[in-house]
Amino acid sequence: MSQGEFRKGVEDLGNGLYAYIQPDGSWGWSNSGLITDGDASLLVDTLFTLDLTREMLAAFRDVTPAARHVNTLVNTHSNGDHTFGNQLVEGARIIASTACKEEMYERPPEEFRANMERWREQGEAGKFLHEVMGAHFDFSGIVLTPPDITFSGRHDVTVGGTAVELHEFGPAHTRGDIVAYVPSARTVFTGDLLFAEGHPILWAGPVGNWIDACEAILGWDVDIVVPGHGPVGDKRAVRAMRDYLVHTRDEAKTRYEAGMTYADAAWDIAFDAYDSWIDRERVVVNVAQIYRELSGGTIVPERAELMKLMGRYRAGAKSPHEAPVCNCGHSH
């Protein structure tokens, strides 16, 4: 399958499968999927807010009667842009990895919303979060709605007569990443193990697990790949993600061994082959996590520090030590 047109809404993948796509795929603008067979349906992920999830569910109902009552909801991982709409899928059993459920309780929507509302108190880190997420989404009304069924490793489900394989590949992007593979349709819904045309973000690691996940998917009989963010595509997107991760790992290791700090390394590594990809500031987190692995856990930057540095990177700072300049002309 060639890369699909990148537009908002439902994309018919054939064989009773659909994707719901949200351009431009940046922070919070995630995708979801629907697998149907007769009257049965399985939803892959909800969206970041209740309004966005309602819009997505209505769009699916407009294209197939099977979406009127979703039997099963699968959460590919714990991040809010894939779980915060869970409460709207009433009556469905919710399936996720055990690690995903644990993370959902650790960062519930109420806490997330409070942090977003207090962004002004959090300095450069808060400003960055507000810029990339807080200013664009309404998180009101969201309540924690965790999975009913959890697993580790692999879990198989059936939608009507269609077999769906759930494979756990985390920890990688998060601690509990899974993908939903439909062999009969040669289709995989990857969650955030694939950011198509965008820099990924290695919240958990190790990076080797993510590379292994890409290799596993490349070994499957797959024609259609639905990423967690970005346009629907094929295995070329998975190869590009694998190559990106290998490049980042190898370049970070070279700089770690040379004694460079993770922040300086993030600014120093060239990503010329990925100039068209969005959200390049995520290299800060990716390099920091690789340094954590290489150091045996002695380098563990705080999340607020990583957010601050991503804000500087995004703002075009020449180095991690260069504080942004506001409109008044003063550094902060």
Image (tube, rainbow, N blue to C red):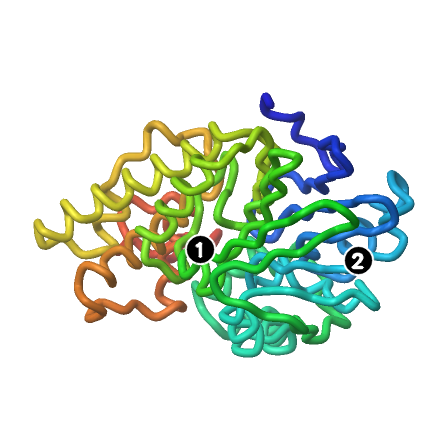
In the rendered view, tell whether residue 265 sits above or below residue 304.
above
Q: Nearer the viewer, residue 40 or 112?
A: 40
Q: Nearer the viewer, residue 189 or 37?
A: 37
Mark 2 closeness class: few <14, some 14–19, many ≥20 residues within 10 Å: some
- Whole-percent x and y of residue 7? 70, 32
- Whole-percent x and y of residue 231? 61, 34
The mark total stands at 2
The residue positioned 57% from the left and 36% from the top of the image is: 225
Precedes in sequence: disc 2 or disc 1: 2
Q: Secondary structure at mark 1?
A: loop
- Whole-percent x and y of residue 214? 41, 42
Task: Report the amino acid beneath label 2.
Answer: Asp
Classify the position of the N terminus by image quarter: top right
Which residue appears farthest toward the left when viewing the image?
258
The residue positioned 69% from the left and 66% from the top of the image is: 94
Res 169 label = 1
Q: Nearer the viewer, residue 98 or 315?
A: 98
The residue positioned 39% from the left and 57% from the top of the image is: 330
Task: Report the amino acid beneath label 1.
Answer: Phe
Residue 6, picture quadrant: top right
In the rendered view, tell whether residue 256 sits above or below residue 196.
below
Which residue appears farthest toward the front when viewing the image?
161
- Whole-percent x and y of residue 134? 61, 61
**Disc 2 or disc 1, which is closer to the eye?**
1
Classify the position of the C terminus by image quarter: bottom left
Locate residue 23 relative to residue 316 in the image: left or right: right
Locate residue 249 relative to residue 172 in the image: left or right: left
Q: Nearer the viewer, residue 133 or 61?
A: 61
Locate residue 105 relative to residue 311 in the image: left or right: right
Residue position for label 2: 51
Q: CA distance from mark 2 to mark 1?
A: 30 Å
